[in-house]
Amino acid sequence: MESGTESLQINILHVLTLNGRNGEYGGPVRVARELCQELNSRGHKTHIFSGALVGSEPKPSCKLSESFIHVKPITQRLKVSSLWSWKLIPPLKNLIRNADIIHIHFARDLIPFLAAFLAIILRKPFITQTHGMIIFDGRISTRVTDLFLTRPLLNKSRLNLVLTDYEASAVEKIRMKSLTTKLPNGIAMPLKLPNPDNLQKRIVFCSRLDKRKGLGKFINLAQEFKDLNLKFEVYGPDGGELQFLKSEIENRGIANILEYKGSLPSDQVQVMLSGIDLLVLPSKDEPFPMVVLEALSVGTSVLVMPSCGFAYELKKFDTNFVAIGEEVEGLIQIFQFYVDSDFIFRSRDEVRDFCTNTFGISNVTDKLNDLYKQVLSYE
C-alpha cells in the first residue's frame, strides 16, 4: 500500500450502532454520511454498516453504500446500548475483512464493542470516534463496563477522534492509552435552498426528546413569551421525554403556541430548518450538535447554551447565538433580543458564509484523510 500518494484509494468501513429514517441515533449518523460522501468524491471507497429497528430502516441513498441488520434491545432499560442480533456477526465480519481501515463510531454500545472485537480478531486497523458519548458518570455499571469492555477495546484502536478538549479529558479519565486527536464535525453546504419567504416567527427545538437536551428549558421559553405571536415547535424522536412534553403542554395551557410535530426523516431536516426563524438547542454539555450545523448551513440563526462544544466559535460570529449562562434565565435574556429585533438581524448569506468558513466538510475531511494515511502507514 503506497500510503504517501494522494491518489491512493482506501477502502473504509464506518460502523454505527443505529441508523434509521427518524434520526434515532442523531449526530453520528449524519457525521458518518457527510464524511463518506466527501471521501467518495476523493476517490475512496466507503461503506456504512449499522443496526436498524424494524419499521424505521434507513432510507437508501444513491450517493452512499450502506447496509444494516435488524436489531432490538436486550433490555428496555438500555434501549440503544443493548441493541443486538446474532445476525450482525457474519456480514460485519466479512465487511471488516475486506476493509483497509474500520472507523467505529464508538459508544458504550454492544454493536461498536462487537466491531472493535472483530477488528482485533481479524487483525484489521481501526480508529474510534466517540462523539462525546464516553463521559464518566461514576455509576458502578459504567465502571464495570469500562473495565472489561470500553477501556480494553479503545486501547486497541490506532487513534481515537474527539470533538473538544473537554471530551479528550473525559476519555482520559477511563485511562485510555491510545492516541487521541481532535476532529470537529463538518457539513456539506446545500447547493440549492428552499425559498425562505413568509417566515412566521417559528422557533424550533429539533433533537431527540431526551432529558439532557434541555426540552424543559424550551418549554419554559415558550411559556415566558406565550402572549406574543410566536410559534414554538418541537421535532424529534422520543428519547423518554415525549410524555413529559405532552403533559406540560396540556397542564400549562400552551397548546396554541407550542406543538410537537413528530420526527422528521433525516433528509427533510434541512428543508424544515430553512423555513424557520430560529433553532434553539438548550442542552447542557452538547459536544458538537449536527442539527446546529444543519441550521447554519441553510442560513438560519441558532441559540445554544455556553457549554456547547463550539459556543466559542458561535460567539465570535455573533454573541446572540449563545445564551448567557446555563439556566433558562440566560436563554430568555438572549431570546428577548431576537424578539426586539423582530428576528431580523443577520442575513442568511452571512450565516451561510460563516458556516462554510468555519465548519465546511472539505477542511474536516482533509484532516481525516491524512489521519487515515498515518494510521495505515505503520501497519
Image (cartoon, helix red, strand yellow):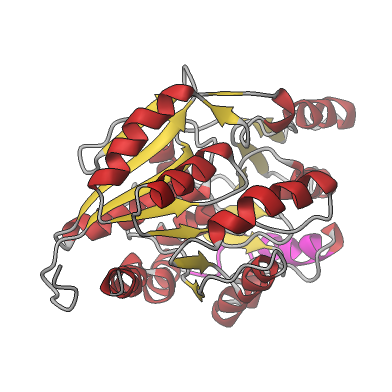
Looking at the rendered image, the quarter that the C terminus falls into is bottom left
Q: Residue 208 at x, y = what percent?
A: 62, 40
Q: Residue at x 46, y 70 (%)?
A: 183
Viewer-closest of 39 and 352? 39
Res. 237 image quadrant: top right
* Tally of marks: 0
Q: Residue 205 at x, y = what percent?
A: 63, 45
What is the span of residues highlighted in magenta in the rendered image?
330-346
Residue 224 vs 66, above or below: the answer is below
- Outermost residue on the right side: it is 251
Q: Residue at x 89, y 27 (%)?
A: 251
Residue 331: within the magenta? yes
Residue 197 appears in the picture as rendered:
no
Viewer-closest of 110 and 315? 110
Q: Residue 52 at x, y = what percent?
A: 46, 28
Residue 42: within the magenta? no
Residue 65 appears in the picture as rendered:
yes
Q: Give the side of residue 367 with respect to residue 216, left or right.
A: left
- Outermost residue on the top side: it is 55
Res. 152 image quadrant: bottom right
Residue 118 vs 336, above or below: the answer is above
Looking at the rendered image, the quarter that the N terminus falls into is bottom left
Q: Residue 120 at x, y = what percent?
A: 42, 51
Viewer-closest of 122 and 126? 122
Q: Residue at x 84, y 55 (%)?
A: 138
Q: Give the side of residue 334 with respect to residue 138, left or right.
A: left
- Outermost residue on the left side: it is 7
Q: Main secondary structure of the magenta part?
A: helix
